[in-house]
Image (cartoon, rainbow, N blue to C red):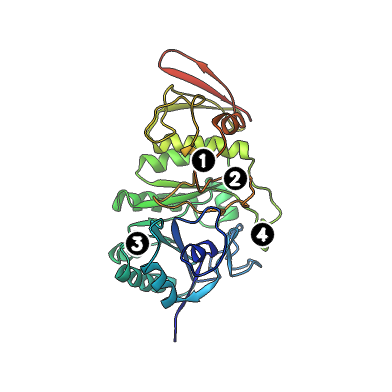
Amino acid sequence: MERKIRASIGSLGALGMRDIKLPAPPTTIYLMVGERCVYDCAYCSQAVNSKGSVEQLSRVVWPAVEWQELKDAVKDAPSFIKRVCFQVVNSRGCLEDVLFFIREIKDVSSLPVSVSIRVTRMEDLEKLFEAGVERVGVALDVATETTFSKYRGGDFKKAVDLILYAGELFKGRVTTHIIVGMGESDKELHGVMKKMFNNGITVGLFAFTPIKGTCLEGEAPPSLRRYRRIQLMRYLLSKRVEFLPEFDRKGNLISMETARRVTLVPGTSVTLLGGWAAGDMVLTSGCAGCNRPYYNEKPLGPMFNYPLPPKEVAEKIIGAFVESEEDIDKEKVRIRFKV
């Protein structure tokens, strides 16, 4: 019997398997393995008790296609495609299924392969790496102990320890995902992200997205102003730029002290408020080659994660979340944020 697999609608368009307009084509081919997860994350359309469509993950539709047709298309993928990523829904037999698909892709393509999966055993990660996976994403999603048990389920400390241990065993090959807007504070997000980056784990940042049929469909996403503050912290942590954050009593980031010159555009050295045009900070974060178009946002915006460098000028983006910049001395600057 012919196998099938789900692929994001944007990926099918990028591969020429669907005739759709792509204002920002994906630079990664996103494939989904399994459906209707055994877990019950309150924000996920694939959760066991979700009433959402099995064709959906976040805002994206994932049609089922014949595997051989998809495999042939990946073999002849256009040059702008930089990666293949399997999003694994933890249903029965999902590990064996994704291992099969990985080996099949490795037979016809040299593209690096990522897998995003919820694991509880290091043996499962070992199997994925042995099959040829370059990076594995082990999502934390929810950044605090109280909200973790409420919205994701399970033991927060065990989940963090497992990700850190994976990062230790497979250095430079582990990514985690964190969702902004799940009841956490800026201070708590800073603490978790810092711990991850200090242990060699890449952090991919998402904005909470209310999805019809989930337990949280009636909740609101984070404000764009707040999300930009978190993006800036994540960006500086990822670039190993030292900064001293200041938080108010509620844990909101209200200011930071940092070096005057921070590289926000490749190949340049510019101040935070002067000369920034492209804005690496607001681009999709995670594995190299992943731009995840419109995963959290509608094509007309507001844009949380940009799939391409934004056309907006520096003053427009930064002015939306930065209150002011002031000199401390010749080496440092203090940035105050709008809260």
Which residue is denoted by mark 1 in the rendering? 282
Q: Residue furthest bottom?
A: 1
Which callout, 1 or 4, points to the residue nearer the camera? 1
Which residue is denoted by mark 2 in the rendering? 303
Q: Amino acid at mark 1?
A: Val
Which callout, 1 or 3, points to the residue nearer the camera? 1
Q: Secondary structure at mark 4?
A: loop
Residue for point 43% across, 34% down: 265
Q: Amino acid at mark 4?
A: Cys
| Disc on res. 125 | 3
Q: Amino acid at mark 3?
A: Leu
Judge the density around disc 1: few (<14), some (14-19), many (≥20) Cα neighbours within 10 Å: many
Residues at marks 3 and 4 touching, judged by CB atoms closer than 8 Å = no
Marks 2/3: CA–CA distance: 33 Å
| Disc on res. 215 | 4
| Residue 63 image position (x, y, % from top left) | 55, 71
Lower position in the chain sequence, tag 3 or tag 4: 3
Q: Amino acid at mark 2?
A: Met
Judge the density around disc 3: few (<14), some (14-19), many (≥20) Cα neighbours within 10 Å: many
Residues at marks 1 and 2 touching, judged by CB atoms closer than 8 Å = yes
Residue for point 48% across, 36% down: 278
| Residue 257 image position (x, y, % from top left) | 48, 23
Lower position in the chain sequence, tag 1 or tag 3: 3
Lower position in the chain sequence, tag 2 or tag 3: 3
Left or right placement of residue 210 versus residue 122 in this view: right
Marks 3/4: CA–CA distance: 30 Å
